[in-house]
Image (spheres, rainbow, N blue to C red):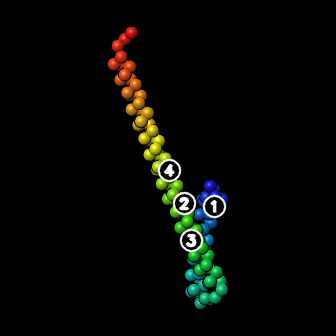
């Protein structure tokens, strides 16, 4: 697990905060007519935040797929174990008493 994945929740909160703060700042700068370097920085931060949030969505989707696969494997193992136990019980019941 990478450092990014270990701290994914904190990174997500920071990216969302940066996105909305820069969105608001960019909107204010646009209304004020200051389309200069601060506006370019705000746009760059918005873009980087969106890229980060997209990566977080992909990682969570991968985790969800992996979790679903593991859950399906556990369910299958339990079913096989249950079937094995039932076969053993049937054999015991069909055996003549000694």
Whether tag 1 and tag 2 are in contact, CB under 8 A, the answer is yes
Does residue 34 appear in this view?
yes
Label 4 packing within 10 angstroms: few (<14), some (14-19), many (20+): few
Tell me, for residue 4, which label it has, or none: 1
Label whose residue precedes the other's in the sequence (3 or 4): 3
Quarter of the image holding residue 29? bottom right
Q: Quadrant of the N terminus?
A: bottom right
Tell me, for residue 59, which label it has, or none: 2
Q: Which residue is disc 4 drawn over?
A: 67
Label whose residue precedes the other's in the sequence (4 or 2): 2
Whether tag 3 and tag 2 are in contact, CB under 8 A, the answer is no
| Residue at 66% across, 86% down | 37
x, y percent for residue 55: 55, 65
Seen in the picture, residue 93 relative to 16 is either above or below; the reply is: above
Label 2 packing within 10 angstroms: few (<14), some (14-19), many (20+): some
Tell me, for residue 51, which label it has, or none: 3
Element assignment for label 3? helix
Q: Is residue 49 left or right of residue 66?
A: right
Label 3 to label 2: alpha-carbon separation: 12 Å
């Amino acid at each position: 697990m990478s450092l990014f994945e270990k701290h994914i929740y904190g990174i997500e909160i920071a990216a969302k905060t940066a996105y909305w703060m820069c969105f608001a700042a960019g909107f204010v700068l646009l209304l004020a007519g200051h389309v200069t370097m601060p506006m370019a920085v705000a746009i760059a931060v918005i873009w980087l935040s969106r890229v980060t949030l997209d990566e977080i969505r992909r990682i969570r989707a991968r985790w969800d797929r992996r979790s679903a696969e593991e859950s399906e494997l556990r369910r299958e193992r339990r079913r096989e174990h249950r079937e094995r136990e039932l076969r053993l019980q049937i054999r015991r019941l069909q055996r003549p008493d000694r």
